Amino acid sequence: MYAILHEGKSIDKSFFQLLLDNLELNKNAVRFYGMGTKSNFFNIEHIQYKTLNNDILDTSVSKVLFIIDADDSFETTKEKLKKTIDELGLNEISDFYIACNQETKKGYLESVILSSLSKEQKECIENFLECSEFKSKTHDKSILNEIYKKAYPSPSYNFSHGNFDELKEKLQNLFE
């Protein structure tokens, strides 16, 4: 059994399950640990870490993948996550993926998803957001995700796009 720790709750988990299916990896061999907010990743006393530790001790989990958003600072996130993994004593059995826009090194999982769109598709979403009456003009992650799914339902994600390569590699390595 493998563990994936991710931000959020069901939206991120559903996305990772679709990606595992796409890679023909057994999603039933994965335990998902929804960490909620990003700050919970850096709290070694968080309840999910206690559950994960118990699962590792009883040998039901053998490898761990942390998936976290960069938000505004890739390097800060990376350093804090490395420190947390070290404090948890998980260096030998874990890896991590920091979700962000590949060019700016800022953003979140939705940034990776949106980066797989064509220029025309991106412009369409940006134009819609600009003329919409959404209160949050900072493009809330859940709004972007819903717009993406409604505008481009089939196929649901362009997993063949190069911006998914690192994440796909990390997931495949989890199963080795």
Image (cartoon, rainbow, N blue to C red):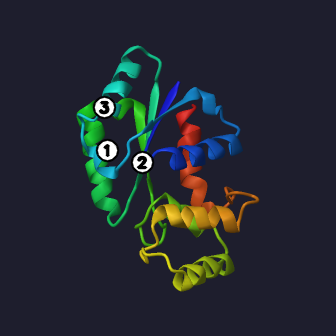
Q: Which sits earlier in the primary sequence, circle 2 or circle 1?
A: 2
Label 3: which secondary element: helix
Dot 3, how many residues are within 10 Å of its Cα: few (below 14), some (14-19), or many (20+)? few
Give the mark, 3 or 2, whose residue is nearer the N terminus: 2
Foreground disc of the pair 3, 1: 3
Residue drawn at (62%, 82%) of the image: 123
Q: Position of residue 22 (x, y in %)?
A: 70, 45
Residue at 28% x, 50% y is: 39
Circle 2 sits on which residue? Answer: 7
Sequence-first disc among 3 and 1: 1
- Mark 2 and mark 1 in contact? Answer it, CB < 8 Å: yes
Q: Hey, what amino acid is under mark 3?
A: Ile
Amino acid type, mark 1: Phe
Check disc 3 and report the residue beneath it.
47
* Whole-number angstrom distance, CA of label 3 to CA of label 1: 11 Å
Q: Residue furthest top?
A: 58
Q: Residue at x 27, y 59 (%)?
A: 76
Mark 1 lies on residue: 41
Q: Nearer the viewer, residue 150 or 173?
A: 150
Please name whichever residue, 17 or 172, is drawn nearer the observer in this view of the structure.
17
Question: Which structural element holds mark 1?
Answer: helix
